[in-house]
Image (spheres, grey):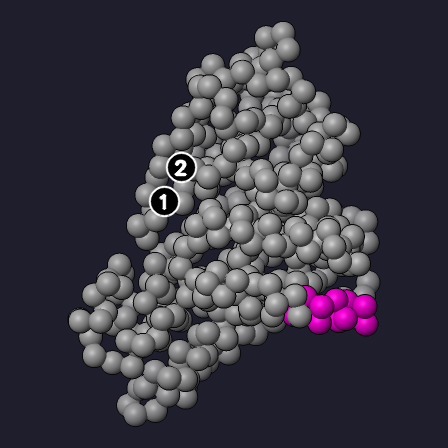
Amino acid sequence: MNMNYTAEELAFRDEVRAFLDDKLPADIAAKVKAFRPLTKDDHQRWQKILSAQLVRQPLARRVRRRFLVTGSEAHLDEESSRYGVPRSVPFGVNMVAPVIIKFGNEEQKQTYLPRILSGEDWWCQGYSEPGAGSDLASLKTRAVRDGDHYIVNGQKTWTTLGQHANMIFCLVRTNTEVKAQEGISFLLIDMDTPGITVRPIITLDGEHEVNEVFFEDVKVPVENLVGEEDKGWTYAKFLLTYERTGLAGIGLSKAALAHLKQLASRRLKNGRPLIEDTTFSQRIAKVEIDLTAAGISNLRIIASVEGGGVPGAESSMLKVKGTEIRQSINDLARRAIGPYALPFVEEELADGFDGEYLSDEHAAPLSAHYFNNRKLSIFGGSNEIQKNIVSKMILGL
């Protein structure tokens, strides 16, 4: 297993850099680097630019393979994060697309995959429910077959960016007479179908990122069933391995670490840069060592996938460590900017403080970013559950 970049991949990296230098909108990159939320238009504008490039370029086939088969941007992630490229909204490209490729029928592939790649369809995820988060198999949303349709009733929660979505992939219970995991199916549902209501949940950072989604007698065509009825738990687990690998955010962490070092180099403590403080520099060194090790593990997993496999239980290990690293970097950045880490006072900074960070557009949003990323250890399957998976599947305990 070779985890080093080949000459071809290094050439591809240079091509990516040239493309980003030429095509990445400056206003979008500035938002990403300043940890500011992107609008739906920002995401769709970038996806349109990217998909047009994939159609034209000789290496498009390789890029499409990474987006739609491995579900990973590992070889592009670091460059993308350094440039301020928006992370692809993962629910289409990185999550449901691999499921459709693996388990969907030919009509579903022809219908949905091109629209996922172009960004024409915006997907959201219908997994978690009140009382069915980490214990996902206890979900209650029902789908009852009625001729050529399923009638869906129930509720999903923590539906990220569901307010923008026109499609949702949904786990539903189609059989109540069998073991919980054996009675679940995987449906593709148009969000414009009558009977669907989306209600916002405002998070701790003041943003509208997640939602509750309610289904009341929603009619879903039978042809929107992926794979076989009552086999959705298998497809759900397959999808989660891709999600958890992506949640490690190695490229994001590298970009955030570089920003942390910049902050610590400018922030003074007793007349000296904070990065020269022994305790603080040791904390940075520890997280950098952990990040290097996680990056190697990520490449190992991706090498296995590109060799014809799929992410396994190792993705749970990577999810745990990767999210812990991202949260540690957030915490150190919050500490580095001191009083400017006060939450939700960005509009007050110009009048309320006098200091070196008034001109630093990257400092003000860091507290909101810190709060938002507290969720990393919960979503995609809580880290406690992931540790159980690692203990059972890897350690054999």
Query: Dot 2 surroundings within 10 Å: few (below 14), some, or many (20 or more)?
Result: many
Which residue is at the front of the view, 190 or 294? Answer: 190
**Residue placed under numbered mark 2 in the picture:** 211
Callout 1, which amino acid? Answer: His
Q: Is residue 355 left or right of residue 366?
A: left
Which quarter of the rendered picture does the N terminus lie within? Answer: bottom right
Q: Is residue 394 left or right of residue 212?
A: right
Find numbered disc 1 in the image and state the secondary structure of the residue it sits on: strand
Residue in the image at 65% along x and 45% along y: 117
- Give the answer, above or below, for where 266 lies relative to 304: below
- Give the answer, above or below, for where 287 lies relative to 126: below
Query: Dot 1 surroundings within 10 Å: few (below 14), some, or many (20 or more)?
Result: some
Relative image position of residue 220 (x, y in whole percent) = 57, 19
Q: In the picture, residue 359 is in which quadrant? A: bottom left
- Give the answer, above or below, for where 332 lies relative to 133: below
Residue 14 magenta: yes
User: Over which residues does the magenta segment extend?
Assistant: 7-17
Extreme-bottom residue of the structure: 271
Q: Is residue 148 left or right of residue 211?
A: right
- Give the answer, above or below, for where 151 lies relative to 45: above
Find numbered disc 2 in the image and state the secondary structure of the residue it sits on: strand
Q: Is residue 230 left or right of residue 349?
A: right
Which residue is at the front of the view, 295 or 169? Answer: 169
Residue 10 magenta: yes
Residue in the image at 56% along x and 70% along y: 82
Residue in the image at 55% along x and 38% along y: 123
Callout 2, which amino acid? Answer: Asn
Relative image position of residue 268 (x, y in whole percent) = 32, 86
Relative image position of residue 387 (x, y in whole percent) = 56, 50
**Residue placed under numbered mark 1 in the picture:** 208
Residue in the image at 57% along x and 74% along y: 289
Label pair 1/2, CB-CB below 8 angstroms: yes
